[in-house]
Amino acid sequence: MRFLFRTDYNQDIDLFQFRLDRFWYGMLFASLATAPLWLDDYWISQVTYVAGFSISVLGLMLLAGFTGQVSLGHAAFVGIGAYAEAILMQRGVPFPISLILAGVLSGLIGAVIGLPALRLVGIYLAIATFAFVIIVQEVLTRWESLTGGNNGLRVPELTLFGLAIDQDWKFYYVTIVVAVLCFLGVVNVLRSPTGRAFIAIRDSEIAAQSLGVHLARYKTMAFALSAAITGIGGGLFAHKAGYLSPESFGLIGSINLLVAVLVGGIGSVHGAVFGAAFIAVLPQIIALLKDLLPDALAHQPGLEAGVFGLILVLTILFEPLGIYGRYRKLLFYVSIFPLYKRATFKRQKSYTRTERVH
Amino acid sequence: MSFFAVENLSVRFGGIRAVDDVSFAVEQGEVFTIIGPNGAGKTTIFNLISRIYEPTGGRILFQGVDITHLPAHAVTQRGIARTFQNIELFANATVLQNLLLGRHTHRSTTLFEEVLFLPSVRRAERAHRRKVEEVIDFLDLQAHRDSLIAGLPYGVRKVVELARALCTEPKLLLLDEPSSGLNVEETEDMVFWIRDIKRLLGITVIMVEHDMSLVSKVSDRVLALNYGKPIALGAPGEVQRHPEVVRAYLGE
Amino acid sequence: MVEFVQLTVNGIAIGCIYALVALGFVLIYKATETVNFAQGDLMMLGAFIAYSCIALWGLPYLVGILIAVAVLAAVGTGLDRIVLRPVVGQPTFAIVMLTIGIGTMFRAGASMTPGWGTETYSFATPYSGSTLRFGTVVIAAEHMTIILATIGLCAGLFAFFRFTKLGVAMQASSQNQLAAYYMGIPVKTMFSLIWGISAGVAAVAGILMAPISLVDINMGFIGLKAFPAAVLGGFGSIPGAIVGGLIIGVIEALAGFYLPAGFKDTAAYIVLLVVLFVRPHGLFGQMARKKV
């Protein structure tokens, strides 16, 4: 068990409360920085994918996990970010600027969609965003002069300040830097008044309003910020994939993002990374398991989807805080060993929470 | 001109007149209590003042300004804070975060500064924290600073909600049944705190309350409502003995 | 003009399917405030079971339908018992994702079931191929059956909720759990039964749709169009869901013909967004707000 003896308000404001945290995050950054030296290309490419995807998940996490708004439409923002990045680069906009513009465009569209969406509660919002993703996908398919439609769109090769990013390890550094900046930005927002207002909206809109939180403004802000971050993730995805086609940005994509948020651990920034890793790793684990399974089962095309669904259901039923929640419990278990009691984390019985007036 | 006044306030839900032509005025520094049987429209008046409901008629004046049609979040900016009957705290946040949210109207930083966490944000955060600590000391919440609301007992949550309202530095505080769900001891504490809020902080209080002993201990004036209509107004003892009030509570 | 009427009739037929799926959403939503994203997959399951009974095992058409509906009702009840009950009180988000996960598992399960798999099957009915003629308007028997069966089913459900004790008890549980519980109604059982009814209705929708769209594991995605229908109707209103379904069906049929390609599949969603932005609680919904 660690205790913090506070002597200064800064200790609560700082990024890391404990000295030990600083050490571990320092180690993490050191290993990320040196990874290309001791990891082969395959793993570098995997880590790049997880880091890039975790940005998009982080965007949705900010909205779903911290502001309490459900969006089934976030794949549309990944798509908008990805296409914007590809098209801007085609038109000769240099890299960091094109990515920022892709994020800004996603954010603006997010604000436009968020502006009316904030009058919608719960399920209505979910369904409106669901309609949004389907419409955006159709637009990407039909606007052939710009997006190439179903033929797809080739993403120009990335150059950074005249330097060609033509190898996995180079793109790895680009992704890691962008990811770290995005995470830092989100953590900063979450420890300042705006982030607290988001959390307030998540937990009780009525109370938030009675404390002077302008619901419409903050919900739009959350939507825009979330869409922008997800769009930046999309921009990196464009380069990772090298080739874009509309079917990657439909409902299934949105559901993947949501699963990452839930399985990773809703309401935690760490959860975004865990969730992204889960989505990246699961197909590979299943591929490995296929060798062990009986033939009749192993060659079923539905196997992957089935396992995916099963894990989702089990997570919600048994570990609503996802991998991060499990990780925290494990840490706690180790730190107070051997005094751990199951009851410490026993969920309180809850009742139907109604939004209706009877 | 009164500090706070309600003029001919009415609201109808369908055919029911929940608040029917209610007028009253509250002077600065007063503790003004609204009593009445269940369903008399007490909480509805609070919800009208904090703009959760739209009145169908009448005006609400605060420091001479008509606030009847302000958006809900702007009411707090004018200096009116409230608590809720059934506690509306941010359950998945810590006590400290809840109280810091009480500082929201005093926010001075922009989103841009916050994304970069510039020194100005840190300075503002420290200032908010100092203010919050004053309130924590005032209401003896030191022990619970880092607890999650979801894990706190009811009595403490009630105090946290009061603390959160005080963090907004209100001029007028609306307390919706501050003693409901509290045990005898906690209710005693509440009496002291309400007195201190009036005396030490100089905040005007409007309160809805059922516990008559608490009402008579802290209130300067009492308004009794029944079926949305005012039936008596005056000193606590007077109103309690008023024949209409007795009839409203005990029936014919 | 004939063309217009013809399209409208076809649209109404498809709209009936949307209406039936939407009806299932609404029944469950009214009772438990859960939106069941697996509704379309329940529909797929119903169609597959009927297909197995009729085409694979050679049972008579009506018997096949009855078996499918009964099995699905049992599945629906079981889902509520086993999966949904433990998550009561969790945020909407978690429950939505839970039903999405269940839907995925159903699809995967169907694709792995011997005899079903990922292929597409046609589904012969006793009335396949025949048409009805009203002046110049021609209605396929499949469409006519859909319309008639929907009317019949809705009338049946209406009578059930209105005139039977069980139906009234279900309505009571939906409107106010606590009050119903105090009146001695076994609320949890009622909810399970409502899930059963919804799943049964989904099975009927699947079976009715099978002759016009063929049976495959992804037919449930058509159920997603029932969302706009349910939302148009206000999500809490059963007549609203039916009207919403018909509106979506007709709009889609007309948009597919008169508007450029691409609008057929998105028309429903565009209408949905427009309606939501004008009336955030649907055409027939009421403004709901938490009480403090």
Image (tube, coloured by chain):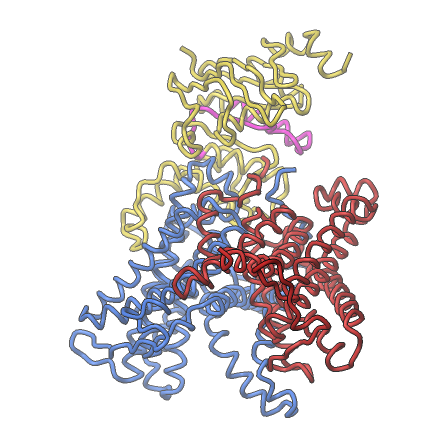
Chain colours: A blue, B yellow, C red
The quadrant of the rendering that contains the N terminus of chain B is: top left
- Closest to the observer, A102 or C225: C225
Residue B186 is inside the magenta segment? yes
- Above or below residue A289? Residue A66 is above
Residue A96 shown left or right of residue A252 in the figure:
left
Where on the picture, by quarter, is residue A41? bottom left
Residue A202 is inside the magenta segment? no
- Closest to the observer, A31 or C39: C39
Residue B194 shown left or right of residue C168 in the figure:
left
Residue C280 shown left or right of residue B20 in the figure:
left
- Above or below residue A237? Residue B243 is above
The mark tally for this picture is 0
- Closest to the observer, A250 or A20: A250
Can residue A338 be spotted in the picture? no
Where on the picture, by quarter, is residue A331? bottom right
Residue furthest to the left: A162
Can residue B251 be spotted in the picture? yes
x then y, percent, for residue C161: 76, 47
- Above or below residue B36? Residue A280 is below
Residue displayed at 76% across by 77% down: C53
Magenta extent: B167-196
- Closest to the observer, B40 or B123: B40
x then y, percent, for residue A228: 34, 59
Residue displayed at 55% across by 59% down: C11
The quadrant of the rendering that contains the C terminus of chain B is: top right
Where on the picture, by quarter, is residue C39? bottom right
Residue displayed at 62% across by 10% down: B232
x then y, percent, for residue A84: 29, 66
x then y, percent, for residue B177: 61, 28
